Image (cartoon, rainbow, N blue to C red):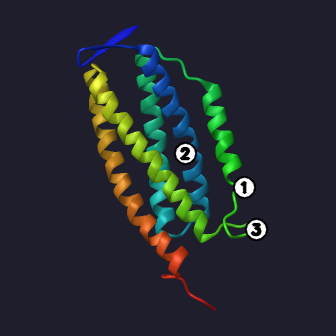
Amino acid sequence: MRGTLTGYVVPMTYLGIYLNDHRAAAAGGLRVAQRSRRSNEGSELGSFLDDFVDELRRDQSLVDSVMDALDVRQNPLKQTLVVAAEFVGRWKPNGHVISYSPLSRVLELEGLIAGVHAKQRLWVVLLVVLESESLRNEISDAEGRARRQLERLEDLHEVALRIAFTGEGTTTG
């Protein structure tokens, strides 16, 4: 199957690979967000992550719908590899031997920011290449949601880095 993109003929194979890459990354990002939510329960970040995790699931479902509409099969190997990489990533040094640290929060937020930025670009790509009006409307909504998520994640990241690197907002005792 082939589609046209601004005068160029683009094999659907590339779009299928692209969608599978984003779908796999979304699975890893969801796991990071869920873990961060558990580690930040009862905080401003935890409250944001409650809604964010639900939005990530909704976005995954939209990617699945796009893949179905284009008859693109999901690549479970890619998803498994990304989930495994996320699990291994938990074991990186964070300044604490076995517990969550302020650095963990900063790095998780940076990963989520990178993931949401990539997801926002995915929505832009799909708005260019998809012809289905109903999917385009949903994708347009998802693109706006991603922009709002980025703004909020960046605000939360600034708070997290101040806590981690300056001690601002923490108490001693």
Q: Distance between the residues labelled 3 and 2?
A: 25 Å
What is the residue that sits farthest to the top in this orientation?
Answer: 1
- Lateral position of residue 86 relative to residue 141, left or right: right
* Helix, strand or loop for disc 2: helix
Q: Label 2 amino acid?
A: Leu
- Lateral position of residue 150 relative to residue 127, left or right: right
Q: Name the residue under label 2.
A: 30
Vertical placement of residue 42 versus 58, above or below: below
Question: x and y percent of residue 7 in the render?
Answer: 23, 15
Residue 138, quarter of picture: top left
The reply to whether the C-beta atoms of the residues labelled 3 and 1 are less than 8 Å apart is: no
Identify the residue shown where x is 48% and y is 35%.
60
* Helix, strand or loop for disc 3: loop
Q: Mark 3 points at which residue?
A: 97
Question: x and y percent of residue 168 in the render?
Answer: 48, 82
Front disc: 1 or 2 = 1
Q: Name the residue under label 1.
A: 91
Q: Label 1 amino acid?
A: Trp
Q: Tag 2 or tag 3, which sits nearer the N-term?
A: 2
